[in-house]
Image: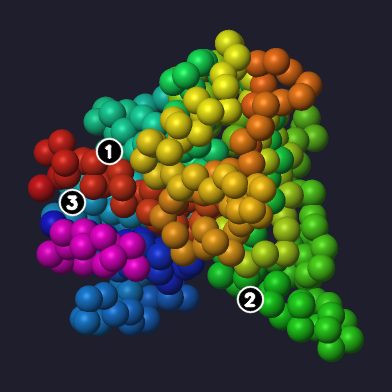
Amino acid sequence: MRVAIVGASGAVGQEFLRVLAERNFPVDELLLFGSPNSAGRTYTFKGRDYEVKLLQENDDFRGVDVAFVSAGGSASKRYAETITKHGAVMIDNSSAFRMEDDVPLVVPECNAEDALTRPRGIIANPNCTTIIMVVALKPIQALSPIKRIRVSTYQAASGAGAAAMQELQEQCRQVLDGEEVKVDKFPHQLAFNMIPQVDVFTDNDYTKEEMKMYYETRKILHSDVKTSASCVRVPSLRSHSENIWIETEAPVSVEAVRSALSAAPGITLVDDPAHGRYPMPLESAGRDDVYVGRIRQDLADPCGLTLWLTGDQIRKGAALNAVQIAEYLIKVGQLK
């Protein structure tokens, strides 16, 4: 298996290296690519050093079986043909192709089979907030179709990259030391604050992040479900959280939901509020599963349920999901 990572120096690129090693993904040859700023850097994978090559429009991807790409939407669009022209499967972590009709948008726990039809050789990784939400909703969807979703997200600094995480840490120090707080990666100071804006606003006053959750959920679940989202940046370092209200076609009991989630892949149920046990970002950070709890009947809707979840944005929300897609393709014989 000849594997490439594009954007190897970024937070997700580094997570790719960790996830591939931890899961013993069958890597016979590894190629790392990056921008002029990262080309020449060296990273270690399974005891061997690899140098980052400059990403160029040439034949560097000849013979590559799968390319994990996390270099931003503009780079994905520019280099997609270069990456795929010799037959490599491009699993793209940007938003560049997610809503294209001829590019599958895949979360393996929900719609793995969609990855089998990829006329352009590209499979899109969904937005992190969408991924961790649909992993939890898929088992409930099987109990009764979900008609509406209302969700409020609490997104960690990790969603804006490694430099944003460093900025939050530095802002906390600046506040505690009585220094002027410097803001660069966020629209406002994040330390000791919350920002009700993730990504830029669109014409309907929802942000792009919120609209991604609307459209991507429908594509992944093959449903006309409607999602109304409010996305909030919070001063935690890693792992996003979400509070979700859903309306199903028929009433579903809390007990049935707990049972379905307990048996579902990719989920850890933590739902014992009487003893103070519920999912928290500190618990899910660095873990593969989406942690779900605080499952309740919605007091305002007889067909409603509400639940709380948290999941690692860099792992399941990005690198892990992409690797799981590739593992599925190996399982069904579409990757060597």
Q: Of helix, strand and loop, which one carries label 1?
A: loop
Task: Give how far apart the Cα atoms at labels 3 and 2 are.
Answer: 34 Å
Q: Which residue is mark 3?
A: 65
Residue 109 vertical position relative to residue 140 in the rendered view, above or below: below
Q: Secondary structure at mark 3?
A: loop
The Cα–Cα distance between marks 3 and 1, rounded to whole angstroms, is 11 Å
The quadrant in which residue 110 appears is: top left
Region of the chain picked out in magenta, as a range: 18-30
Residue 273 vs residue 176: left or right?
left
Estimate how packed mark 2 is, as few (under 14), some (14 to 19) or many (20 or more) residues with alpha carbons within 10 Å. some
**In the image, what residue type sits under mark 1?**
Gly
Please tell me which residue is depicted at 73% across the width and 49% down the height of the picture. Answer: 232
Residue 20 seen = yes
Q: Amino acid at mark 3?
A: Asp
Q: Residues within 10 Å of mark 3 (few under 14, many from 20)?
A: many
Q: Position of residue 330 (x, y in %)?
A: 17, 44
Residue 51 vertical placement versus 95 (above, below): below
